[in-house]
Image: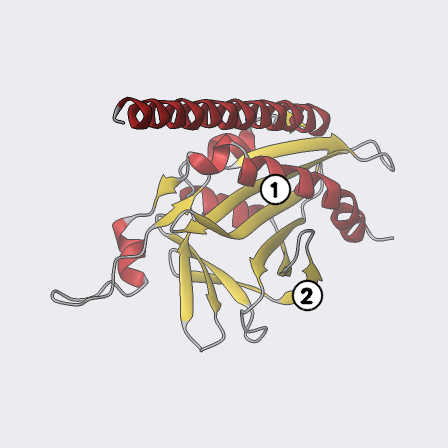
């Protein structure tokens, strides 16, 4: 097995963990607004146009790491979730193994994008092509298509400093979609030690438990309010006779 394949295989579980944390947790709710330039690139209508302005979002970058049991080297995944109108559209993963120059750039998007010509990330208009490699079903229905390409330290350096970064793809009707990628916190997150995968999973478990408890409490509160309202209406009807 090559080092590249080893990274890709080992990182699958870590990337899945981070996707859950970033998408369902507070990271996506803290999504940063898109830059005005990005909105213009999506085709903001001229004055008098009826088409509403598209609102983009990008979660803060997150870094989760774990040890590769094969060689005891640390593997880290950096992830950002991109959204349109508060709906998650794409997931970007950068996977790297300690002391390895080569890294993997993985991008996941929903079905409906043209497999040719694939996707690309532009760094100040400098394109990095990302070919689609596979489409997989996802739990709960639907499917996701994944693009994958090898990158190196030069890509990381450019992503840290670029003024305008976009993920671009072509949809089923031939329209090019440009989703703005935020790199405001990328450098700081990339240079950080990251969060251990086990810690991240435990944090996500606690967050889900808290969310379920909050939802249950809200449901009970709503039921109590409806019951009280019904009793008040019943009392008012009885007194009016």
Q: Residue furthest left?
A: 48
Q: Nearer the viewer, residue 100 or 42?
A: 42
> Residue 75 occupies which quadrant of the picture?
top right
State which mark lies toward you, 1 or 2: 1
> Residue 134 occupies which quadrant of the picture?
bottom right
Instruction: Name the secondary structure under disc 2.
Output: strand
Q: Residue furthest front?
A: 241
Residue drawn at x 49%, y 31% is 26
Q: Nearer the viewer, residue 209 or 229?
A: 229
Percent x, y of residue 196: 68, 26
Percent x, y of residue 225: 41, 24
* Labels 1 and 2: the sequence-earlier one: 1
Q: Which mark is residue 162?
A: none
Measured along the vertical axis of the image, is residue 38 above or below residue 43? above
Measure how far apart labels 1 and 2 are at the Cα level.
Answer: 19 Å
Instruction: Name the secondary structure under disc 1.
Output: helix
Percent x, y of residue 157: 49, 44
Q: Which mark is residue 19?
A: 1
Q: Which mark is residue 133?
A: 2
Callout 1–callout 2 Cβ contact below 8 Å: no
> Residue 46 occupies which quadrant of the picture?
bottom left
Q: Quadrant of the C terminus?
A: top left
The 10 Å Cα crowd at callout 1, few under 14, some 14 to 19, many 20 or more, is some
Percent x, y of residue 177: 42, 65
């Amino acid at each position: 097995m090559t080092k590249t394949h080893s990274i890709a295989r080992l990182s699958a579980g870590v990337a899945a963990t981070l996707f859950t944390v970033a998408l369902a947790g507070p990271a996506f709710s803290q999504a940063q607004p898109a830059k005005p330039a990005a909105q213009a690139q999506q085709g903001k209508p001229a004055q008098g146009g009826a088409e509403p302005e598209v609102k983009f979002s990008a979660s803060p970058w997150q870094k989760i790491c774990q040890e590769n049991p094969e060689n005891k080297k640390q593997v880290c995944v950096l992830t950002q979730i991109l959204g349109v109108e508060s709906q998650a559209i794409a997931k970007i993963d950068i996977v790297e193994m300690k002391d390895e120059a080569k890294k993997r750039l993985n991008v996941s998007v929903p079905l409906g994008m043209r497999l040719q010509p694939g996707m690309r990330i532009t760094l100040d208009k400098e394109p990095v092509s990302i070919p689609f490699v596979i489409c997989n079903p996802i739990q709960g229905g639907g499917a996701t298509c994944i693009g994958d390409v090898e990158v190196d330290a030069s890509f990381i350096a450019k992503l840290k400093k670029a003024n305008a970064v976009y993920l671009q793809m072509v949809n089923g009707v031939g329209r090019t979609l440009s989703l703005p990628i935020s790199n405001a916190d990328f450098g700081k997150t990339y240079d950080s030690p990251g969060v251990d995968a086990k810690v991240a999973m435990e944090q996500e478990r606690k967050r889900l438990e808290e969310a379920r408890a909050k939802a249950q409490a809200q449901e009970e509160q709503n039921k109590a309010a409806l019951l009280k309202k019904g009793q008040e209406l019943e009392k008012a009807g009885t007194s009016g006779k």
